[in-house]
Image (cartoon, helix red, strand yellow):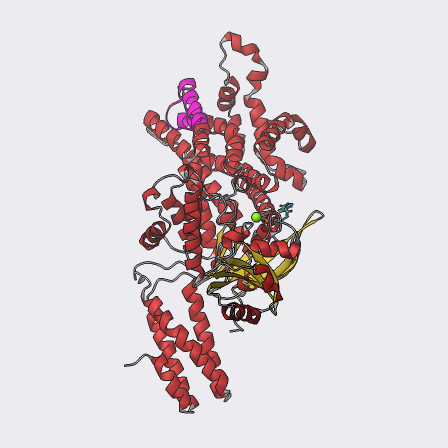
Amino acid sequence: MGTLSAPIEARNLTKRYDDLDAIRGLSLSADEGQVLGLLGPNGAGKSTTIKVLVGLVHPTEGEAWIGGHHVQDEGIQARRQLGYLPEVVGLYEQLTAEAYLRYIARFHGTSGPRATHRIEALLADVRLTQAADRPIGTFSKGMRQRLALAGALFHDPPVLVLDEPLTGLDPEGIVKMKQAIEQLGRQRTVLVSSHELHAVESLCDRAIILRDGEELTSAPVAELTRRDPPRYTLTTADPLPEPRALTDVDGVRSIHASSQSTLQVEVTDADAASLLVDHLVRGGHRVRHLERDERTLEEAFVDITGVRA
Amino acid sequence: MSDPWTDLEQALAGDDPAQVHRTTDRIRDAVRGAFEGRQLVRGSLLVERRRRLEHTLAELDDAVAGDRIDEARERAEQVRELAPALVDQARQLDPIDAEEEVSTGGWLANAGTVARKEAVLGIQGTRGLLLFGILGLTFGIGLRSAIGGSTATGGQASVKLVWNYAHSLAFLALPLAGLLAGHGLVNEERRSDTIHILAAQPVGRIGIVLGKWLGMAATLGLAVAASAGLVGTAAYAVTGTLGPPSAAVTYPLACFGLALAFGSIALLASTLLERTGPTLAVGLASFVLLGPVWQNAFLTRSLEQAGTIPDPGSVLVYLATPFTAWWNWTSELLGPVNDATGLPQGEPWHAALVNAVETGALEALPFYATQPYYAIVIAAWIAVCLGLAAAVFRRQDLA
Ligand SMILES: Nc1ncnc2c1ncn2[C@@H]1O[C@H](COP(=O)(O)OP(=O)(O)O)[C@@H](O)[C@H]1O
Ligand SMILES: [Mg+2]
């Protein structure tokens, strides 16, 4: 047995369409139990990257592995470890939900009563038990998405690849899908793409931000959302007569007062924030609340690119 | 008895590699025991976890043997974390029913899954309806013509006539049935986006093409068998015999073969083209219209010679045989339509057919007398189309 490989690994992927590079020189790697976000505006190359990993699109350059299996040379082994939810969910309209899952079951060597057991459990998980015998043609977008997810989970794959799983769902659907992803991400490796950065930032451990087919940044989400220099929101019990004067305190770079008792303070580092609190307390004020502000991923994207996502 | 992984720390402290090995072996046994008789899916999370645990155990043994105590402790820590959860989860898996065969879900089996779906949807859908309609109608018209048109001879001879009529007419409809069965098999899945989930299953691209071809063959086979069964039953009801096996078996088989060749061409087209509906219609029309050119370009032959080995012949001529024969026969049958002079005198539109049956020209029809040659040409067509379709589809991006 060789060394254990990352559940998802891609090196130097390029996909060229005519004279357009949908992705260029992209590398990524996800660890076990990690939810990896593949983020960026429309046309950034997210779906192309995912299709290369699933083996739907052949890269012009570079290579990819799922669970150590080369997606091109050992595609069948690679896809055995993979569950895939496509961006556009195409299902056979004439089949019932149950018949669809039975069809998927056969691809994993399961049929008959053994499949029934699993299918019932999956249908219950995605809340489609009532609709099990209805043709897929009568399903709403959310139901299709859930059924496709059930199909992707049939063989309990260690790696899940979800392309824009939240797009087009209603608010309740989004909440439920996020819960599902969160739960799946505890044991599995999940790659999730989204053009709505804020929608997935709470889900992802790490994010890769793409634009125009290239990686802008790849970092833990906590790192991306950290402001540098740090900013705090500070609330006092009593109104401060002269908030602006606080810029004189060591380490305070700027002050923005939304009211006389609520301030946004930009400081050089975390120590400066505690010095500021000391300063206020010594001046006879009561500090009620101090919280470090994070930036959203969207703000991070804007900061990095100067362009709105 | 305690769980073996709880003894790991003590074993390590004992500074005795043999003791550690015994413990890791007991862990391996415990894991094997937990997995025994459980239903597993290849590539699933638990299978991967087990692989990981076994790898870590091997590394632990290695580290102990190499006296790398820090690494050994680290590995032991990982084992203590992985093993209990794994054993626990494995015990919760469904037990395998001893009677049931555990299929591996290999690529060939999965091509079968594709075929099965294709056949089921093909037979249930409009495609199947049209297919049964076309073949049933033509076989039926043949039957009706034979029973009504020739009652002079009795017994075996008349049953043979029934088959001749049915086969001759069905033969006309075969390219249409074949094209219908193979039409859009791949590109329709691309247009409806169902190809993405299909191609993400553990079945290769070749498995998908093969599966689709098999599904089409099953659909066509069933349609031909059902239509032929209808004719056979009716012939039996009228005459009390099924006729010579050469007629009852060879004719439907020859029909099936030609339809399959056309179906394979349609399958190839569906991998090459984005839309095949118009293309196939134009293709079929020009094939019929170009019949005379085709015939003169490759071989000039009479109906009686259709299906016999051309001599001298190039590969192209050989490959063209089924289609040339088809065209010959079509033009023969459609003769009265082109030349309508007999119709006002009350001559039936299928006079040519009746005539061909009665003069024995049908005996030479494709490919009654030359089955092996016919089968080889048909097989060559299918192999070329299927091979090309697989090669093309394998390289395609399913974006
Ligand atoms: N099949 C294709 N042919 C040509 N260009 C394509 C194709 N698929 C994607 N592209 C282009 O590649 C770029 C990346 O697309 P995509 O990966 O779908 O982006 P995303 O999923 O991030 O929105 C886009 O400019 C898109 O137009
Ligand atoms: Mg996309």
| Residue A9 visible in the displayed image | no
Give the left or right position of residue B267, taking residue B310 as reference. left
For the point 42% across and 66% down, the residue is: B47
Residue A41, image x and y in percent?
A: 60, 49
Give the left or right position of residue A92, taking residue B100 as reference. right
Instruction: Point out the residue furthest to the left here.
Output: B1
Camera-side residue of B281 and B196:
B196
Instruction: Point out the residue furthest to the top here.
Output: B345
Residue B350, image x and y in percent?
A: 50, 18
* Residue A199 sits inside the magenta stretch: no
For the point 49% across and 53% down, the residue is: A84
For residue B31, above or below residue A46: below
Task: Write the start and end of the magenta stretch as one range.
Answer: B136-163
* Residue B153 sits inside the magenta stretch: yes
**Chief secondary structure of the magenta portion:** helix
| Residue A8 visible in the displayed image | yes
Residue A166, image x and y in percent?
A: 48, 48
Number of disc labels? 0
Give the left or right position of residue B309, taking residue B125 as reference. right
Residue A118, image x and y in percent?
A: 34, 54
Camera-side residue of A203 and B217:
A203
Instruction: Point out the residue furthest to the right here.
Output: A19
Snapshot quadrant of residue A218: bottom right
Snapshot quadrant of residue B137: top left
For residue B91, above or below residue B346: below
Camera-side residue of B359 and B26:
B26
